Image (cartoon, grey):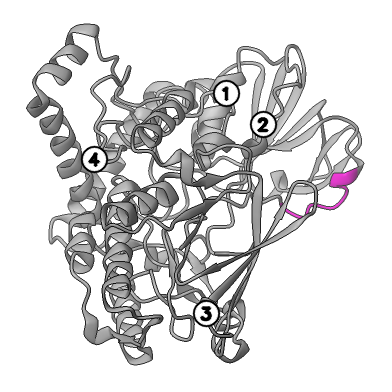
């Protein structure tokens, strides 16, 4: 069995398979080490916006977190050490990028059903045969670099936040950051004291609320370690709070609109307290309902923008028009000089599995099947692509809470399918088209009653909301806890 990707999703799936007695597992990772987004996103200030006691595997709770909101390096260390303790690192082959997965309708005797083609750093090709293929590349693996005219002409260093250039010295430099999403909210405060000047280009403002971070003292960490119930309580409290946010965003609670109005009041007070300049403050007011984009947590974003050497460039006239050797030209004709250009423009969340070609029954192309938006039964399985599963696939993202709870549920579901295949000697498990269509229609109908239905661009692909789950983590865990075999054809 082949798992593609060695982040939280891929490693967690490998463990679930092993726990079910399935030892013939290989994890293919295109990078030189494991870690997923926490390996790739090393920009200054990178951290998780979900409290760490919850943003961790349930089978590897960590009493040693230094802060409630751990930074990138600490999360990466946690992931690697937990995977090592479970014996998962020995399953991983790094420096191997999967470029194609092909299902063979009539394989030769003794061959398996899927052929996985991979390329290493030297361009050499390797093939793997597998009964089951699990794509765990997720929704946040492909950085978006906008096609702005003239970008190739810029005279200085240019890089995306997810590909941070640590060899570029920003001290005293004029830096332009394009984008004001989750990454920019962290990296701008992370570099503001180092740069000579900073121009931040904003297409749309975000709702940013206080980040209730705290340092976990040595005494508290000892308590977590010696009395595990205290860490479970911390984890539970965070889960309940984030699930309440999920319920508000998904329209599952009558009190949801009132709760979101309260969050908006907190945001407005946070903005007024931290930004002195009225012009800047007005520019930081979002023009869409709260929750339409992910609510961000930061105590340093607004103060960074209020610094004298920082300019927030926004509004119709402030739209980026083109890049020139000396800087960024905006729609009003003004040139904003820059020595370094950083794209803080996020990821291609709706362009799932773009990095590989997946061919199913009868030569069907997965990307053609998803031409009007990605979809999968329970976010996991696609009709016509038997024994091929997605982790962090379509409609499994969250507006709040920890994605790891979703990833673990998906891993256990896949492992149950794989275990039956092993026990029964089945070669193929394919989701029924009628079951997948029914799930998708119900999901889309529910999504139209969420706050995201008011968002015309951020979550939609082909007119559909393809990223987010319309319920809570608990509901998804219940839906996936037992495989409904009536939804599958087993042969």
Say whether disc 1 or disc 4 marks the residue closer to the N-terminus. 1
Contact between labelled residues 1 and 2, with CB atoms less than 8 Å apart: yes
Q: Nearer the viewer, mark 3 or mark 1?
A: 3
Q: Is residue 285 visible?
A: no
The residue to which callout 2 is attached is: 164
Residue drawn at the location 65% of the way across and 50% of the way down: 96
The label number, if any, that marks residue 59 in the structure image? 4
| Residue 360: x %, y % from top left | 55, 82
Earlier sequence position, callout 2 versus callout 4: 4
- Answer whether residue 151 is magenta in the image: yes
The tag earlier along the polypeptide, 2 or 1, is 1
User: Which is more toward the observer, 448 or 50?
Assistant: 50
**Residue 415 image-quadrant placement:** bottom left
Location of residue 435 with respect to 51 vertically, above or below = below
Cα–Cα gap, marks 1 and 4: 30 Å
3 or 2: mark nearer the eye: 3
Above or below, comparing residue 442 to residue 451 in the picture: below
Residues in magenta, as a range: 146-152
| Residue underneath mark 1 | 44
Query: Can you tell which of label 1 and label 4 is closer to the viewer?
Result: 4
The residue located at (44%, 26%) in the rendering is 77
Distance of label 3 from label 2 (alpha carbons)? 46 Å
Q: CA distance from mark 2 to mark 4?
A: 32 Å
Q: Viewed as shown, does residue 126 lie left or right of 218?
A: right
Main secondary structure along the magenta-highlighted residues:
loop
- 114 or 406, which is in the foreground? 114
Percent of width and height locating residue 184? 56, 35
- For the residue pair 122 and 444, the one nearer the viewer reads as 122
Task: Mark 3: give few (<14), some (14-19) or many (20+) Cα within 10 Å.
Answer: few
**Residue for badge 3:** 110
């Amino acid at each position: 069995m082949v798992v593609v990707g060695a982040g939280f999703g891929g490693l967690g799936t490998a463990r679930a398979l092993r726990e079910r007695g399935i030892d013939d597992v290989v994890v293919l990772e295109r990078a030189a080490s494991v870690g997923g987004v926490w390996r790739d996103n090393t920009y200054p200030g990178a951290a998780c916006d979900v409290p760490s006691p919850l943003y961790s595997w349930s089978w590897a709770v960590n009493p040693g977190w230094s802060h409630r909101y751990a930074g990138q390096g600490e999360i990466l260390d946690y992931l690697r050490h937990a995977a090592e303790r479970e014996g998962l690192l020995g399953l991983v082959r790094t420096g191997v990028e999967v470029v194609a997965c092909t299902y063979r309708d009539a394989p030769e005797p003794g061959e398996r059903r899927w052929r996985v083609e991979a390329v290493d750093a030297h361009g050499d090709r390797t093939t793997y045969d597998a009964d089951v293929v699990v794509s765990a590349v997720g929704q946040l693996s492909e950085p978006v670099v906008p096609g702005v005219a003239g970008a190739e002409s810029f005279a200085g260093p240019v890089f995306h936040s997810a590909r941070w250039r640590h060899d570029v010295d920003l001290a005293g430099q004029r830096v332009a950051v394009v984008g004001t999403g989750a990454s920019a909210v962290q990296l701008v405060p992370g570099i503001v004291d180092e740069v000579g000047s900073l121009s931040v280009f904003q297409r749309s403002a975000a709702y940013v609320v206080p980040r209730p971070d705290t340092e976990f003292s040595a005494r508290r960490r000892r308590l977590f370690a010696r009395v595990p119930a205290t860490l479970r309580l911390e984890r539970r409290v965070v889960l309940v709070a984030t699930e309440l946010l999920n319920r508000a965003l998904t329209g599952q609670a009558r009190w949801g609109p009132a709760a979101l109005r309260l969050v908006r009041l907190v945001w407005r007070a946070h903005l007024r307290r931290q930004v002195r300049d009225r012009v800047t403050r007005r520019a930081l007011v979002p023009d869409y309902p709260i929750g339409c984009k992910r609510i961000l947590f930061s105590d340093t974003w607004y103060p960074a923008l209020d610094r004298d050497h920082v300019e927030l460039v926004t509004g119709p006239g402030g739209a980026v028009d083109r890049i020139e050797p000396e800087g960024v030209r905006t729609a009003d004709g003004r040139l904003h000089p820059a020595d370094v250009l950083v794209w803080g423009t996020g990821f291609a969340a709706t362009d799932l599995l773009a990095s590989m070609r997946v061919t199913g029954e009868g030569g069907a192309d997965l990307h053609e099947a998803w031409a009007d938006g990605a979809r999968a039964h329970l976010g996991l399985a696609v009709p016509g692509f038997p024994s091929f599963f997605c982790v962090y696939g379509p409609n499994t993202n969250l507006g709040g809470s920890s994605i790891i709870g979703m990833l673990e549920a998906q891993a256990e579901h896949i492992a149950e399918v794989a275990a039956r295949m092993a026990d029964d000697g089945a070669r193929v498990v394919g989701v029924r088209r009628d079951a997948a269509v029914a799930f998708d229609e119900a999901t889309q109908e529910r999504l139209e009653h969420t706050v995201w239905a008011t968002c015309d661009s951020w979550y939609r692909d082909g007119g559909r909301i393809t990223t987010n789950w319309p319920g809570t983590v608990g509901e998804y865990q219940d839906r996936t806890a037992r495989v409904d075999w009536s939804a599958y054809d087993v042969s």
